[in-house]
Image: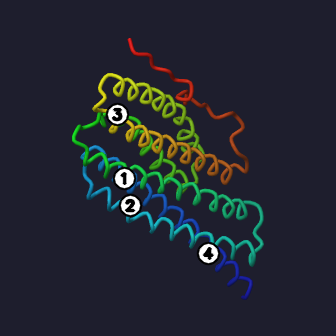
Amino acid sequence: MTGGHTVAAFDAELARLHQIVVTMGRLVEEQFAAALEAIAERDAGKAAQVIEADAEIDRLELELEALSVRLLALRQPMAKDLRDIVSALKIASNLERMGDFASSVAKRAVTLAGLPVEPPVASLSWMGETVLGMIRDVVAAYDGQDAERAMAVRNRDGQVDAAYTSLFREFLTYMMESPAQITGCTHLLFVAKSIERAGDHATNVAENICYIVQGRLPSEERAKGDLSSYTVVEKE
């Protein structure tokens, strides 16, 4: 009987671990979507709400860490149970960073909302929506233990990198052609980088899902398309 209770308690703790990750992921998705809306709508109030709500994501990560340490110390898990716990720690860390990037976007939104010259925020739309979709899909992939869906998220990361390189060139061009846009475009460059980094972390989560389900990380190298470090724009 005692053994049965022990197994049931362990299963309940693993289920709680899983639920914390899913809850974190859905909060990150909500925060990221709200941050993008704050940028597009020049809504400083909505941006402030995103910044304030970041604390809940941090709190959930701490709860997950404490539960994971308890499970590792007291349950001595093996095989997939061990992969679940170790990967949950890594995934939660990536989700927390994605929440930080949503907060960073929101902070820039506060500044951008107060600028006298409206910057070209529409240029960020495709990249932001793509990364938001990656976040949504990777959370669903974790919840459903769906390695195929996780790999589809991973495969989109190269497109986000390429979009960032294109935006980098576009914003530099705006700044060269119109000095009044320098402040706004500089902040938008930081926003674009935060979006691109959130995509990287979503990809990390996708790889950990593959590890949970298949027992190994993807073998092929991840495609990278961020060439902004080598981008030079010359004024005609």
Residue 68: x and y in percent read 66, 70
User: CA gap, disc 1 to disc 2?
Assistant: 6 Å
Q: Which residue is mark 3?
A: 182
User: CA gap, disc 4 to disc 3?
Assistant: 52 Å
Q: In the figure, is residue 58 to the left or right of 3? A: left
Residue at 69 percent across and 49 percent down: it is 214
> Which numbered marker is on residue 210?
none
Q: Earlier in the sequence, mark 4 or mark 1?
A: 4
Does the image show residue 129? no
Does the image show residue 201? yes
Identified by mark 1, the residue type is: Ala
Identified by mark 3, the residue type is: Ile
Q: Earlier in the sequence, mark 1 or mark 2?
A: 2
Q: Quadrant of the C terminus?
A: top left
Identified by mark 2, the residue type is: Ile
User: CA gap, disc 3 to disc 2?
Assistant: 25 Å
User: CA gap, disc 3 to disc 1?
Assistant: 19 Å
Residue at 64 percent across and 35 percent down: it is 222
Q: Which residue is mark 1?
A: 106
Q: Earlier in the sequence, mark 3 or mark 1?
A: 1
Q: Nearer the viewer, residue 148 or 57?
A: 57
- In what element is the residue under mark 2? helix
